Image (cartoon, grey):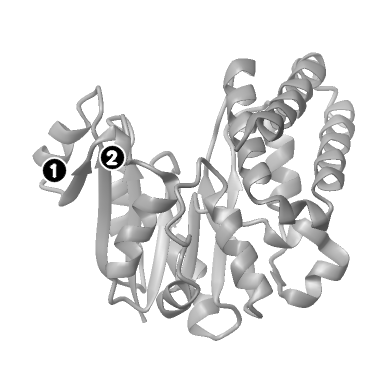
Amino acid sequence: MNVDIICPLYNAEKYIENLNYSIKKQKNVDINSINYILTESNDKSEDILKELNITYEKIKKEEFSHSIVREKVAKKSNSDILVFVTQDVNIVREDWLENLIKPIINNEAEACFSRQLTKYDNIEKYIREKNYPENSYIVNKDSLKTMGTRAFFFSDASSAIRTDIFKKLNGYDGKKLPTNEDQYIAYKIITNGYRIKYCSDSEVYHSHNFTLKELYKRYYDTGIFYKQNSYLDNYGTTKTGGGLAKYVLKRAIQDKNGKVLLRFLPDMLARFIGMKMGKLNGK
């Protein structure tokens, strides 16, 4: 089965060369195309793409949406499998892609996502531990009884889905989603009777060190998403968030991580208030 890779780019000058090289060195996979979509940037992203002779499509800032950009390319694809990545993932292993798409090829699942690791010793470290455990698992419609909204956890920082299923489900339904487009499609995959596999042997590094202001903005956008897709609240969203906060605090205490313990309360407040305000003000 062959693969089309889709990767949006924006101010990506520090990522492009390594990302493209990492994708091309993947073993035991049939890559049909690598599709970069560059939103007009303020850095040298376009110069680097030209210098490396990388094919790309350029769009204006007002045309960008996390969902629309991916959907337009995906719907034109004639590949067997769509693979979505973000510009800031660091791919170290040469079997990353093979391990990501193998469950689809073997008919274990219709969609998959990778394990994400971080290089930072911050709150994100413990969030990654909780969200991306050492053992792989598969979720389906029956998983909703025990996992609730957790069954829709899915990240297109590194993910794969059968092309025919993406098209059959009509992708993101042409919606201009502000964020969480991956959760949107995961909901459709699961509730339509398909399966998602978390592939712990498909590893990428995806590291962030957000300021409180950046965290607030991210969760504000997430709040808007939940306001627009309020049916997701029926699956226990707030319980999932509370469990994650408890895990982070417990692990930070175990590790005697003073930096994380000092940051914990303002960090969680930024997330909580951002989410609440997004839900309040979202249309």
Q: Quadrant of residue 89?
A: top left
- Determine which of the numbered discs, if any, sits on residue 213 in the image: none
Q: Is residue 104 left or right of residue 164?
A: right
The residue pinned by badge 1 equals: 52
| Secondary structure category for the residue under label 2 | helix
> Along the polypeptide, which appears first: circle 1 or circle 2?
2
Q: Position of residue 250 (x, y in %)?
A: 89, 33
Q: Position of residue 205 (x, y in %)?
A: 52, 43
Find the distance from the CA under tag 1 to the CA under tag 2: 9 Å
| Secondary structure category for the residue under label 1 | loop
Q: Position of residue 159 (x, y in %)?
A: 50, 60
Q: Is residue 77 left or right of residue 157?
A: left
Residue pictured at 74% horizontal, 30% vertical? 276
Instruction: State whether residue 193 is above or below residue 22.
Output: below
The residue pinned by badge 2 equals: 16
Counting other residues with Cα less than 10 Å from the Cα at mark 1, is it few (<14), some (14-19), or many (20 or more)?
Answer: few
Q: Evaluate if marks 1 and 2 touch, with contact meaning CB atoms under 8 Å apart.
A: yes
| Circle 1: residue type | Leu
Q: Is residue 207 visible?
A: yes
Residue farthest along the front direction in this orientation: 283
Q: Is residue 114 visible?
A: no
Quadrant position of the C terminus in the picture: top right
Q: Quadrant of residue 188?
A: bottom right
Q: Position of residue 141 (x, y in %)?
A: 74, 75
| Circle 2: residue type | Ile
Instruction: State whether residue 262 is above or below residue 229.
Output: above
Quadrant position of the N terminus in the picture: bottom left
Between 73 and 33, which is closer to the camera in this rendering?
Answer: 73
Residue pictured at 86% horizontal, 39% vertical? 242
